[in-house]
Image (spheres, rainbow, N blue to C red):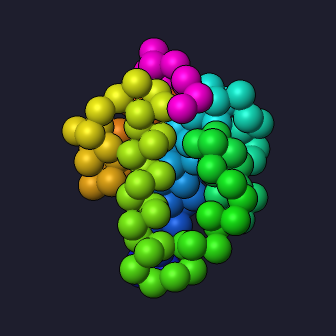
């Protein structure tokens, strides 16, 4: 009887806390970059918009599907995102390893977007 209550509580916690905690900062980053915030929640379109924010062509999307190259491109794009908001390599490492902390810093912080 209590097991079902715990599963429901965990589900509600995820829906009302964890998901918004990860969506809102990225939404704000897109707005700072001059793009619509809703674009950050649509799976493939969000990557295309991010490529536009970073000044890269749309066909870079296909590089994500190549096993090792996709990881390298993802790290490189994170570094470009960090640089476009005036942050350094240390902030890039934070975005990669502690995104739950560093994306809100980027989204809510006072840093401004500068196209590279």
Compared with residue 95, is residue 14 higher up or lower down, i.e. above or below? below
Magenta stretch holds residue 109:
yes
Locate residue 21, reporting x and y percent.
49, 45
Task: Report which quarter residue 103 is drawn in.
Answer: top left
Compared with residue 10, is residue 21 higher up or lower down, i.e. above or below? above
Locate residue 15, reporting x and y percent.
57, 58
In the shown orientation, is residue 36 left or right of residue 23? Answer: right
Q: Residue at x 41, y 37 (%)?
A: 82
The residue closer to the viewer here, 78 or 116, is 116
Residue 80 in view here:
yes
Magenta stretch: dominant SS?
loop
Which residues make up the magenta segment? Answer: 108-116
In the shown orientation, is residue 76 left or right of residue 47? Answer: left
Locate residue 71, reporting x and y percent.
41, 70
Magenta stretch holds residue 115:
yes
Q: Residue at x 52, y 19 (%)?
A: 112
Residue 5 in view here:
no
The residue closer to the viewer here, 56 or 46, is 56
Locate residue 104, reporting x and y percent.
43, 35
The residue closer to the viewer here, 20 or 4, is 20
- Position of the C terminus by quadrant: top right
Query: Which residue in the rendered view is the most extreme toward the top?
Result: 110
Compared with residue 115, is residue 65 higher up or lower down, i.e. above or below? below
Q: Residue at x 55, y 24 (%)?
A: 113
Compared with residue 8, is residue 49 higher up or lower down, i.e. above or below? above
């Amino acid at each position: 009887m209590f097991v079902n209550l715990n599963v429901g509580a965990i589900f509600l916690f995820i829906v009302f806390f964890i998901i918004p905690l990860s969506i809102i900062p990225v939404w704000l980053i897109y707005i700072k970059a001059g793009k619509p915030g809703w674009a950050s929640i649509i799976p493939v379109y969000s990557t295309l918009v991010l490529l536009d924010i970073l000044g890269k062509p749309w066909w870079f999307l296909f590089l994500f599907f190549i096993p090792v190259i996709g990881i390298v491109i993802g790290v490189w794009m994170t570094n470009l995102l960090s640089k476009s908001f005036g942050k350094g390599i240390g902030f890039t490492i934070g975005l990669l390893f502690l995104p739950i902390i560093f994306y809100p810093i980027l989204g809510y912080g006072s840093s401004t977007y500068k196209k590279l």
